[in-house]
Image (cartoon, rainbow, N blue to C red):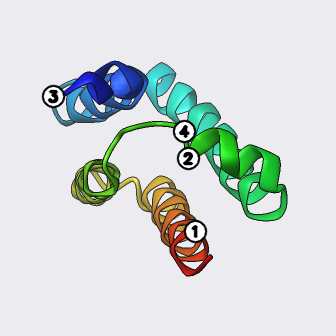
């Protein structure tokens, strides 16, 4: 369970997304867009830059945990009708799967 400290930011973002169910806020939406954009850039760069991929592989966090976070985030964002943001999270999830498959093939 030592991997939980590696996922604190992910858990905070998930809790922020959950809070949108109860409290809609443009500030939170903008912050999520910024975080999502950074996450997308990081995932794309990890696909093409092996050094970044090696750094991200050093975490002990199991893959299933990230899948749960991505699916939960997408489901909540669809529920609150933030379709573009949920689409961006879906792309992040797909890029994670592609990156993971590249790692297991090697």
> Which mark, by number, is residue 103?
1
Please tell me how many numbered marks the rendered image carries.
Answer: 4
Q: Where does the image place residue 45, in percent across and percent down from the top left?
A: 79, 53
Which numbered mark, 3 or 1, is in the foreground of this view? Answer: 1
How many angstroms separate mark 2 from mark 4 (CA)?
4 Å
**Mark 3 → mark 1, Cα distance in angstroms:** 39 Å
Q: Residue at x 61, y 75 (%)?
A: 102
What is the distance, in whole Å, between disc 4 and disc 3 at their CAs?
Answer: 36 Å
**Residue 71 in the figure: left or right of residue 34:** left
The disc, 1 or 4, on the residue closer to the chain's N-terminal end is 4
Q: CA distance from mark 3 to mark 2?
A: 35 Å
Q: For mark 4, what is the residue?
A: 58
What distance separates the C-alpha of mark 1 from that of mark 4? 12 Å
Q: Nearer the viewer, mark 4 or mark 3?
A: 4
Q: Are marks 2 and 1 in contact (CB under 8 Å)?
A: yes
**Mark 3 in CB contact with mark 2 (< 8 angstroms):** no
What label does residue 22 carry, if any? 3
Whether 2 is drawn above or below 45: the answer is above
Q: CA distance from mark 2 to mark 1?
A: 9 Å
The answer to which of marks 3 and 1 sits earlier in the sequence is 3
Query: In the image, 74: left or right of 37?
Result: left
Q: Nearer the viewer, residue 61 or 106?
A: 106
Question: Tag 2's secondary structure?
Answer: loop
- Tags 2 and 4 touching, CB below 8 Å: yes
Residue 25, placed above or below residue 106: above
x%, y% of residue 11? 30, 28
Query: Is there any visible trace of residue 25 in the rendered image?
Result: no
């Amino acid at each position: 369970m030592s991997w939980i400290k590696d996922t604190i930011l992910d858990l905070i973002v998930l809790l922020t997304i959950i809070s949108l169910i109860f409290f809609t806020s443009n500030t939170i939406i903008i912050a999520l867009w910024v975080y999502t954009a950074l996450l997308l850039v990081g995932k794309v760069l990890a696909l093409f830059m092996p050094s970044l991929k090696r750094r991200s592989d050093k975490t002990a966090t199991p893959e299933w945990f990230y899948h749960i976070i991505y699916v939960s985030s997408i489901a909540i964002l669809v529920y609150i009708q933030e379709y573009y943001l949920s689409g961006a999270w879906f792309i992040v999830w797909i890029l994670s799967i592609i990156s993971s498959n590249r790692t297991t093939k090697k």
